[in-house]
Amino acid sequence: MQLKLTMLATVLSIFSPFLWATSPSFDCDKARGQVEEHICKDAALAAIDVKMKKVYEQALQNIPDSERSTMKAMQRGWIKGRNECWKGQDERACIEYAYKSRIVDLQVAGGLIEVPSPVGFNCQHMADKPVTVVFYNQTDPASAMITVGDDQALAFSTRTASGARYDGQNVSLWEHQGEASLEWFGTKMQCQAIKQAAVNASGDAFSFSALKNTAYQGFESGAYRRVVLNNGLWVGEPYQPGGAIAPQVMLIDGIKATGDLNGDGEDEAVVLLNYAPGGTGQFLNLAVMSKSGAQVSGKADNIATIFVGDRVRVRNLQIKNGKIVLGVVQVGPKDSICCPGEVAERVWQLNGTTLQEVESNKQTSRLSPETLAGNSWVLESWRYGESAYQSKPITLSFQDNKFVGQSGCNRYFATVKAGGMPGDISVSPPGSTRKACQDPKLSKNENRFLKQLADVHQFSYFAGKLALSYGQGNHYGVMIFSLDSSLKSE
């Protein structure tokens, strides 16, 4: 008898991780309603419930204390909505979509993923409505936030022979090299990427269009050391057959530097790549590209790649005096991995096909509102995927502990105070001049900007852009600003 018990204990100890992996984050003995009972009986749904809880806890830790009660209330509201899935035609599909969508929402709201620039599309039947897509290649699975006019829908990557396909509730998007087919709540249309078409016409091996569809190396030993991107993304095979976790490499769009790095009189290009091996890490890499073989293949060669760090936020990228200079916000000696607060300059020089980091002459500092001083920014998007372009750009600078700039028709100012965590700030209600806007659209956008500015509680960087996170009640978002060298500091 003792032997049997010992053997049983051994078997349970070996297989206990698998048993736990099929249990959701809540107690199934206390399951409330049909939906929770369904989750308890479905191993895949139980696993995604555990994942969502982990992401929720990470997001909760990554936001200001003052916002946590709101996020908790929204989480309770989401649970109530999830529990209504029994009313749908396909209960399981409804539950799975609810979890996937909530995970992306939490990753964005909690600043857990780096957000790329939106891609604009010209689509049939949508001449009066802008169509933009934000491709979240860091989510698992990859996802796309599709915005048509004032409406948004989230779709998730599915396997396809070529290009990229995303499916959601009543929406689907297939995209390949700037051409797209969009089905939007029963309306089917063909679309053309606005920026992509212009880049494709250049024929430049250093264009983002070309760099998004070439080979890179230096990420892992073995099978994944060399990868070929397709429209800026490579996804490897799942670590477990049929599993959802797989390595990914993504080109960070919108930021690169060109210059001569080896003294041969020819320019090289430096780009940034995010390598996600499948866990929570987001590993930033520098890649040097050469046109040495472009005359034959039409594509640049990746001659050197180097790891920069985990969850590094990029302020700027330049080539100065034959060296790569990268301005970053990174994890300092006393920072937690979620919340980098050290502002630093990193420098590399190219020796043959090897990048060697050299000491910078600039000292590190802490992330604070003063970090923004000396630059002027122009508002690029109101939130992810919603362009803020207008005839009179909205600008922002930091001077004398204030945000100042043009809100469209008027000048504004608002006092800024630093919070307890790196990047946390509070902004006073803005004051402004009182010039009347002749254009109703400019007036509407001006009011919207000043309201959102007053609700800003955090700033950060990604890909050389400034991100101001705002939120109050159920209205949350991130305003994206591009550094504009043509604008003088206010």
Image (spheres, helix red, strand yellow):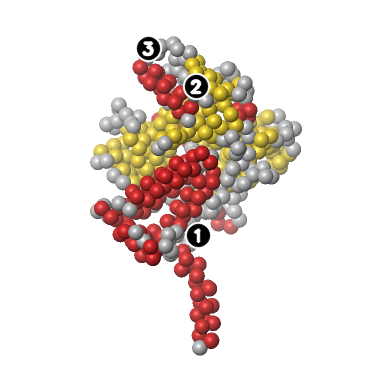
| Rendering coords of residue 56 (x, y %) | 47, 49
Q: Between marks 2 and 1, how big is the CA–CA gap? A: 51 Å
According to the image, label 2 marks what residue?
430
Residue ID at (33%, 53%): 83
How packed mark 3 is, by other alpha carbons closer than 10 Å (few <14, some 14-19, many 20 or more), is: few
Residue type, mark 2 in image: Pro
According to the image, label 1 marks what residue?
239
Q: Quadrant of residue 438?
A: top left
Q: Quadrant of residue 152?
A: top left
Question: Total number of numbered labels?
Answer: 3
Q: Answer whether residue 217 is visible to the viewer in this image.
A: no
Residue ID at (52%, 49%): 58
Residue ID at (72%, 32%): 362
Viewer-side residue, 443 vs 359: 443
Give yes or no for contact between labels 1 and 3 (Cβ–Cβ under 8 Å): no
| Rendering coords of residue 455 (x, y %) | 48, 30
* Label 1: element kind: loop
- Eye-nearest disc, 3 or 2: 2
Q: Between marks 1 and 3, how big is the CA–CA gap? A: 59 Å
Give yes or no for contact between labels 3 and 2 (Cβ–Cβ under 8 Å): no
- Eye-nearest disc, 1 or 3: 3
Residue type, mark 3 in image: Gln
Viewer-side residue, 110 vs 174: 110
According to the image, label 3 marks what residue?
438
Q: Give whichever of discs 1 and 3 has the lower sequence position.
A: 1
